[in-house]
Image (tube, rainbow, N blue to C red):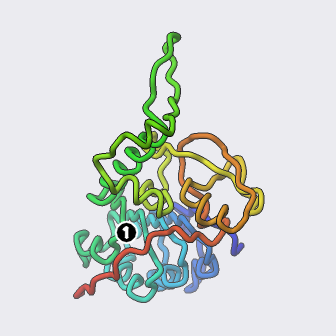
Amino acid sequence: MKNISELDLSGCNHWEGDSKGVALVFLTNLRSLKLDNTDIKEAVLVTVLTKCKKLLRLSVPGCTGLTSSKICAAKLVNRDLRLLELDCRNINLDVPLSKIQKVYPSLLRLNNRCTEKGTRKLRAHAGSFSWRVGARECTTSGKSKKRKRDNAAATSSSVSNEESKVSFSNHCSIMSTGLSYSKSCEQEMFGCKTCHIDFGNFVCLACSKNCHEAEGHDVFSLGYGFGCCDCCIFSDCLCLEHDEEPRSVIY
């Protein structure tokens, strides 16, 4: 049970007793938690947020018993909590969205819309990938394919956005893509036989080098594809970006 990384309990309102949902506090490896339109107790959710250091996505729209101030307060207790996606529509917004973004500076998506940071990061990710691999080109049959850039071209060409080169090489791609599977999240995929990460899961370029190859792991290429890096679930990811300390919010 502790190894569960993604949990969707949307619409589940059949927990019994005053301790409803208390079992969630033991799921310390959660990466994604969806509780849409449930009657989850606020105290239980706050406890989950203070214990789950790997949680990247929280979805609680329609949970009328929750307040945004308590979601913010959890960050001040759990400094390791770096939510990338938060959906808190139709809850009690006693703290406005602008202050939520200040408390969670890592947010890429808020209420199912890209934040300014999310848009910037996603563009940098796409630009970095295109710079390394090359743009799509059409063949005579009309199908598109990848054109691998040779080393000479990669060395001689310049990139207008330096952030796109530096950020991708130093940090896990999930810090730019979030938990999205859109076309703009296309990237190189790698597996690790040592960590049993293979087809169906993958690690990004940065994690393959810094978290796996650097430790002497048996890493292999899985090609290109859409998705989000699984390094933080299957291993201790060393490439997660630490954002600035959350700012104090007056409730």
Quarter the N terminus occupies: bottom right
Amino acid bearing label 1: Ser
Q: Is residue 91 left or right of residue 134?
A: left
Q: Quadrant of residue 166?
A: bottom left
Q: Give the residue at mark 1.
A: 106
**In this orientation, which residue lies closer to the viewer: 119 or 193?**
193
Q: Circle 1 sits in a helix, a strand or a loop, which is it?
A: loop
- Residue positioned most to the top: 140
Spot occupied by residue 9 in the image (x, y as percentages of width and height): 56, 63
Spot occupied by residue 155 in the image (x, y as percentages of width and height): 43, 43
**In this orientation, which residue lies closer to the viewer: 205 or 39?**
205
Spot occupied by residue 144 in the image (x, y as percentages of width and height): 50, 23
- Residue at the location (76% across, 59% down)? 196
Spot occupied by residue 203 in the image (x, y as percentages of width and height): 61, 56
**In this orientation, which residue lies closer to the viewer: 3 or 93?**
3
**In this orientation, which residue lies closer to the viewer: 175 or 155?**
155
- Residue at the location (64% across, 50% down)? 190
- Residue at the location (34% across, 78% down)? 244
Number of marks in picture: 1
Q: Is residue 76 left or right of residue 209?
A: left
Query: Vertically, is 247 above or below 6?
Result: below
Quarter the C terminus occupies: bottom left
